[in-house]
Image (cartoon, helix red, strand yellow):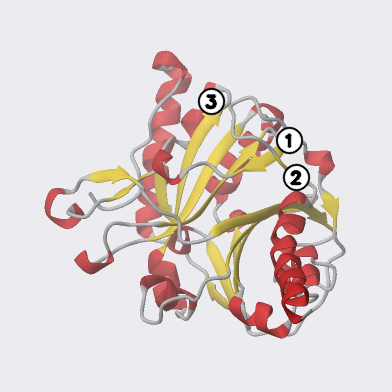
Amino acid sequence: MEYVVHEKNVRKEKDWVKEVREGGSLRNVELRDDGVHGWASPPAGLFMVRGANYFQKKVKVPCSEMLLEPLGVDWLRSNAKLDHVLAHPENRVMQVLQKLSEEARKTSFILAINLQVSSKKHHSAVFYFMTDEPIVEGSLLHRFIHGNDAFWNSRFKLVNRIVKGPWIVKAAAGNHTACLLGRALTCRYINGPNYLEIDVDISSSTVANAILHLALGYVTTVSVDMAFLIEAQTDDELPEKLLGSVRIAQIEMEAASYLENHNENCSISAHEQPGSQFGLYWRKLSKTLSRIGSHGSKNGRVDVEEAEEK
C-alpha cells in the first residue's frame, strides 16, 4: 500500500511540469518555421557558443547542452510594469508549485526571465526554466544563482536567432547576435527560496526599445529564437552551456493575459546604466540600417556584428 501511494505522489510531482508547460496564454507548439502564436524550445545545437579552446583560438561551436528544462512562457499585459512576477499572488507557476510536497519544492529550482515591454500598454514576456536535479555546489550555475550585481551583470547573456520575419526586422535585430544584457539594459535580480527571477527593462535603452517596437509592428509574422546563458570567462568554465532556449512564434499582441499590477516591498538589485560596449554596438547597427535604407540589403538580410570582445 505504501508503495502504491508513493508512486501516485511521484506521478503528481511530475505532472506539475506538464501542467505549467501546457498552460499560459502562449501554447506549447511544435518546433517548426510555420508555428503560430506559441512557444517551443529549440535545440541547443542551433546556437553558437564559446568552445573548449575559445580563449586560445576564438572558435565558437554549436552548443551541446542545456542546464535547465523549458517550463513555460507567459505573455502578459498589465496596468503598469510588472516587476517580480513570481511573487504575484496570481502567478500560475508558483500557484502550481505551492501545491507540491515540501520535499518536492526544496528540490525544484525555477529561473524566470521577465522581458518587460513598456509603452501605453505594459507587456511582459516571461520565460520559465526549471530543474528538479540537485545543483552542484561550486558549479558555474550554482555561482550564478547565488551571485551578486557585479557577477550577474557581467555574465548574463542573450543570443538571438531570427527564424522568420521581414528583412527589416532581421536587419534591425541582427542574427546570432550576442549581448550581455546586464551591461546593455536595466536588469533586476530577485533571489527567492527556490527561484531566481531576472527582470529586463527593454525601455531602459532608447535604441533597443525602438527596435523592439519595430519588431512588434510585424509581430504576427516574426518567429525568433532566444537562448540565455552564463558567459564563460575562464578556461575551466568552457565550453559554454545554455541556461535554456525559447522560440516565440508569431504571437498576437491582443492575446496577452491580463494581470493586475501589485505593490510589493522587496529588495531588488538593479544595474542602471547601459555599458559603453553596447552603445558601440548600437552605433554600428544604426550605420548599418542607414546603409540599408539607402541601398537595400543583399538577400533581404544583414548580419550584425555581435556585441562582445573578439
Q: Is residue 84 left or right of residue 195?
A: right
Residue occupying image coordinates x 39% and y 30%: 288
Q: Position of residue 245 (x, y in %)?
A: 52, 49
Q: Which residue is mark 1?
A: 37
Q: Nearer the viewer, residue 214 or 310?
A: 310
**Amino acid type, mark 3:** Ile
Query: Residue 26's mark?
Result: 2
x and y, in percent, of residue 120 in the image: 79, 49
Identify whether 52 is placed above or below 44.
Answer: below
Q: Secondary structure at mark 2?
A: loop
Disc 2, disc 1: CB below 8 Å?
A: yes
- In this figure, which residue is indicated by the disc labeled 3? 168
Q: What's the distance in space between the residues labelled 2 and 1, CA to CA? A: 6 Å
Disc 3 vs disc 1: which is toward the camera?
1
Which picture quadrant has residue 27? top right
Which element is circle 1 on?
Answer: loop
Specify whether residue 117 is in view. no
Q: Mark 3 to mark 1: distance in Å?
A: 21 Å
Q: Residue at x 52, y 46 (%)?
A: 226
Q: Is residue 126 left or right of residue 242?
A: right
Comparing 218 with 209, the one in front is 218
Q: Residues within 10 Å of mark 3 (few under 14, many from 20)?
A: many
In this picture, is 308 found above or below 28?
below
